[in-house]
Image (spheres, helix red, strand yellow):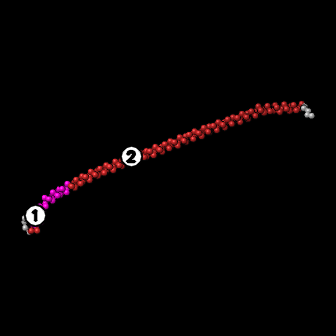
């Protein structure tokens, strides 16, 4: 049979007292430090997740604005292109009208000059025909 003597009781009390002192002085502070550390890590992870979400949102916002700017630039380019084409048509039309007016004016001048030349020649035809007839006939008419 097992005999319990007084030293065993002292050792049990000693172990319990040691566990109580270690718990108060060592285990609780270590557990508190570990708890604080895990809370800090959890807070940092939450902040990192929040920062990641914010970064993703800002990147998406940036991409949206960039796409909108590209779209507006493309529309502006097309608008300028259309305006340029319309301006080109207008200038070509003005040039054609100016050329047509000059051409009409030149035709009128030429017709007038032809008419003047005809009148002048018709006035001179009589004298030319007399001269030719006189030279052919050899006498004055």
Count of residue discs: 2
Left or right: 13, with 49 as reference point: right
Q: CA distance from mark 2 to mark 1?
A: 69 Å
Which residue does the image show at 17% across and 58% down from the upper left? 118
Residue on which disc 2 sits: 83
Q: Of residues 45 and 114, which is closer to you in this image?
A: 114
Q: Is most of the magenta stretch helix, strand or loop?
A: helix
Please, is residue 133 above or below residue 30 in the view?
A: below
| N-term-proximal mark, 2 vs 1 | 2
Q: Position of residue 9 (x, y in %)?
A: 87, 31
Label 1 secondary element: helix
Please state the horizontal and vertical placement of residue 140, each as a whole percent of the image. Answer: 7, 66
Residue 5 left/right relative to 118: right
Q: Work out whether 84 lies above or below 2.
A: below
The residue indicated by pointer 1 is 130
Is residue 66 covered in magenta? Answer: no
Residue 114 within the magenta-colored segment of the rendering: yes
Is disc 1 surrounded by few (<14), some (14 to 19) or many (20+) residues within 10 Å? some
Circle 2 SS class: helix
Q: Residues within 10 Å of mark 2 (few under 14, many from 20)?
A: few
Q: Is residue 100 left or right of residue 129?
A: right
**The one of 17 and 139 positioned closer to us in this rendering:** 139
Q: Quadrant of the C terminus?
A: bottom left
Q: Position of residue 57 (x, y in %)?
A: 56, 40
In the picture, the quarter occupied by the N terminus is: top right
Q: Please tell me which residue is depicted at 46% across the width and 43% down the height of the picture.
A: 72
The boundaries of the magenta stretch are 112-135
Image location (x, y in percent) of residue 52: 60, 40
Q: Residue at x 34, y 48 (%)?
A: 90
């Amino acid at each position: 049979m097992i005999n319990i003597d007084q030293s065993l009781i002292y050792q049990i009390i000693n172990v319990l007292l040691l566990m109580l002192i270690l718990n108060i002085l060592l285990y609780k502070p270590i557990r508190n430090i570990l708890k604080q550390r895990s809370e800090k890590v959890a807070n940092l992870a939450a902040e990192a997740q929040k920062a990641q979400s914010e970064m993703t949102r800002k990147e998406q916002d940036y991409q949206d604005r960039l796409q909108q700017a590209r779209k507006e630039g493309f529309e502006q380019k097309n608008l300028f292109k259309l305006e340029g084409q319309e301006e080109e048509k207008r200038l070509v039309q003005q040039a054609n009208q100016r050329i047509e007016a000059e051409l009409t004016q030149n035709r009128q001048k030429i017709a007038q000059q032809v008419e003047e030349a005809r009148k002048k020649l018709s006035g001179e035809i009589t004298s030319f025909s007399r001269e030719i007839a006189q030279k052919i006939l050899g006498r004055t008419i």
